[in-house]
Amino acid sequence: MKKLSLTTFTLLILLPFTLHAEAGKIDMHGGKDTKVPSTMTAKKAKIFYGKILEIKPAMGYKYLKIDEDSKEIWVAIANAPVKIGDKIGYDKKTKMTNFKSKTLDQEFKEIYFASEVYLPQQATGPKSMKQMLGLGTAKKDPHAGMGRGMSPEPEEEAPAKPFVKKDTYTIEEIHMWRKSLKDQVISIKGSVYKVSRGIMKLDWVHVGDGTGNEKKLTDDLVFTAPSAKVKKGDKIIAKGKVTVDKDFGYGYFYKVIIQDASFKVQ
């Protein structure tokens, strides 16, 4: 078995698992506004091995019942080409007890969310994990497509119109002019699409205003704050600092994200 870097996806068989709240998404499919502890560490994990007995797909992820030395356990991983009968390797750094998945309508007495997963070597020869999953070459925003499948992120495009300094921007404009807006504090008016709480000690608020292109993932913008007292459906004015090409690690990469955000419910 070979190991694939968590951030580069360059080899075949290590599948990085992105801790995804709500969503996706941490649901980790526990449903919207789910709060979970932040347990991610950089310490190298011990790898365990077992045989897949059952697979339950959920919003781009897979919940696996595994036979580990004649003991049945549950392990959640990001979507990957696995099948019943496969023997895989996985870490147990993130353990949840009495975890209720609203997506699956099932409670797990004990489940592990793996960040390092080793898949069987494929006989067809080397192929990147992104190719196996049908993804493009660009880094995928793990929050941008929550609940909307595993569509690839579009290639870089030049702005459709020249940058204009404004008091309030649209979601589409922030995506389009993100490089010109880098490190600036911006303001938008929109609606809360979803809230993912307690990830890396931050609340992640997805905001839309009816502009942008869903297929290009420019109709949704993520705002982060230590605590966001807003909920899905709220009409808000949101402010924060524009950060571009932000890589939080653990698969959290954003072409544009708004940090140190504040919200005013209208």
Image (cartoon, rainbow, N blue to C red):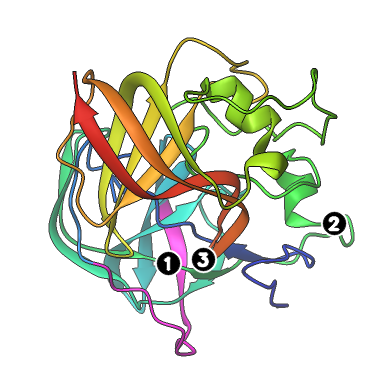
Which numbered disc covers residue 250?
3
SS under mark 3: loop
Q: Residues within 10 Å of mark 2 (few under 14, many from 20)?
A: few
The CA span between labels 3 and 1 is 11 Å
Relative side of 133 to 127, left or right: left
| Residue type for callout 1 | Ala
Residue 43 place in picture, x, y as percent: 45, 89
Q: Position of residue 120 (x, y in %)?
A: 67, 66
Query: Which residue does the image show at 63% across and 28% down from the upper left?
Result: 165
Residue topped by disc 1? 114
Is residue 24 in view?
A: no
Mark drawn on residue 127:
2
Residue closest to the eye, 107 or 209: 209
Residue 60 position, x and y percent, is 49, 38
Disc 2 is placed on an element classified as loop
Q: Earlier in the sequence, mark 1 or mark 2?
A: 1
Residue sitting nearer the eye, 123 or 203: 203
As helix, strand or loop, the secondary structure at mark 1 comes to loop
Q: Residue at x 27, y 64 (%)?
A: 201
The disc, 2 or 3, on the residue closer to the chain's N-terminal end is 2
Q: What residue type is disc 3 on?
A: Tyr
Task: Please name whichever residue, 177 or 193, is drawn nearer the observer in this view of the structure.
Answer: 177
On the question of residue 98 being in view, the answer is yes
Span colored in magenta:
38-53
